[in-house]
């Protein structure tokens, strides 16, 4: 093999390795950009990933409820498609460390079977790291028959390490059909008032 051919071979091998390395680095680069920019779009295979605000939280045994602080949690919903999606209540008062359950109602108003997924977003952004969910419908995809109605819980606890400057947290979910274009996180939670507020009992457990 001539010297020119060897140089060409070395260049091709180098380019191949460089392309492989770049492709391998794309995923962590994308995640870092999303985290920095505050975009909260979950791939369907990453429903419970730590650091995204969508990880399943394990409640410590020594959790203390901070009765000296009260935080208002506002619940906002957005739908992308012909179905109904609403929380049982628009807002509630909670204490850091308090275990809270809120129910959401879903109904497929289409005349066909629907598979759907919900993605969360938080305001202010810093609340995401302190809003810990033990159970959430956003961890899974769900399939509903035509006209089928379901109720699913969100069980959460707010970390007492949340900045004391934060007195209100807005938890917003966007419910979209699997296979459709994944929507971006809502820019203005609670921009649209609900005409019919849901009435239900909020379940709480103080630990």
Image: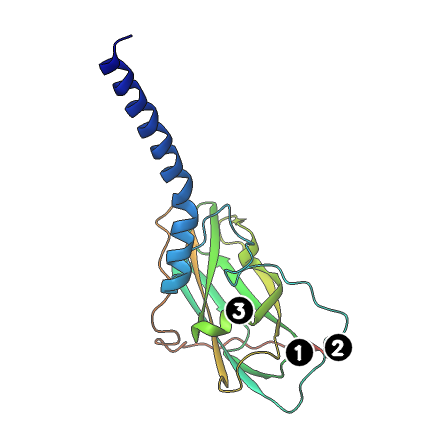
Circle 1/circle 2 CB separation < 8 Å: yes
Along the viewing direction, whichever of 174 and 105 lies nearer the viewer: 174
In 3D space, how far apart are the residues under numbered discs 1 and 2 (Cα atoms)?
Answer: 8 Å
* 23 w.r.t. 136: above or below: above
Residue 120 place in picture, x, y as percent: 47, 63
CA gap, disc 3 to disc 2? Answer: 21 Å
The residue lying toward the viewer, choosing from 195 and 62, is 62
| Quadrant of image for the C terminus | bottom right
The answer to whether residue 94 is seen in the rendering is: yes
* 129 lies left or right of 57: left
Q: Secondary structure at mark 1?
A: loop
Q: Is residue 52 above or below residue 179?
A: below
Q: Which residue is mark 2?
A: 207
Between 31 and 44, the one nearer to me in the picture: 31
Task: Name which residue lies at 52% across and 63% down.
Answer: 53
Dot 1 corresponds to which residue? 97
Residue 2: horizontal and vertical position, in percent?
A: 25, 9
Q: Is residue 60 left or right of residue 192?
A: right
Q: Which mark is residue 124?
A: none
Question: Along the horizontal axis of the image, is 205 left or right of 150?
Answer: right
Which residue is outermost to the bottom? Answer: 68
Residue 129 image label: 3
Q: Position of residue 66 (x, y in %)?
A: 67, 85
């Amino acid at each position: 093999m001539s010297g020119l051919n060897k140089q060409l071979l070395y260049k091709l091998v180098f380019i191949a390795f460089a392309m492989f390395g770049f492709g391998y680095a794309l995923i962590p680069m994308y995640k870092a950009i999303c985290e920095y920019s505050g975009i909260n779009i979950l791939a369907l295979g990453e429903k419970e990933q730590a650091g995204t605000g969508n990880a399943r939280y394990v409640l410590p045994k020594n959790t203390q409820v901070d009765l000296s602080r009260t935080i208002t949690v506002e619940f906002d919903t957005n739908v992308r498609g012909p179905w109904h999606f609403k929380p049982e209540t628009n807002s509630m008062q909670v204490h850091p460390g308090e275990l809270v359950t809120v129910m959401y109602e879903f109904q497929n108003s289409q005349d066909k079977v629907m598979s759907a997924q919900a993605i969360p977003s938080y305001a202010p952004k810093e609340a995401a790291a302190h809003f810990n969910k033990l159970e959430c419908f956003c961890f899974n995809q769900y399939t509903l028959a035509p006209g089928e109605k379901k109720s699913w819980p969100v069980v959460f606890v707010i970390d007492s390490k949340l900045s004391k400057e934060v007195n209100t947290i807005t938890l917003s979910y966007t419910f979209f059909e699997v296979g459709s274009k994944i929507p971006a996180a809502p820019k203005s939670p609670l921009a649209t008032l609900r005409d019919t507020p849901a009435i239900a009992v909020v379940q709480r457990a103080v630990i």
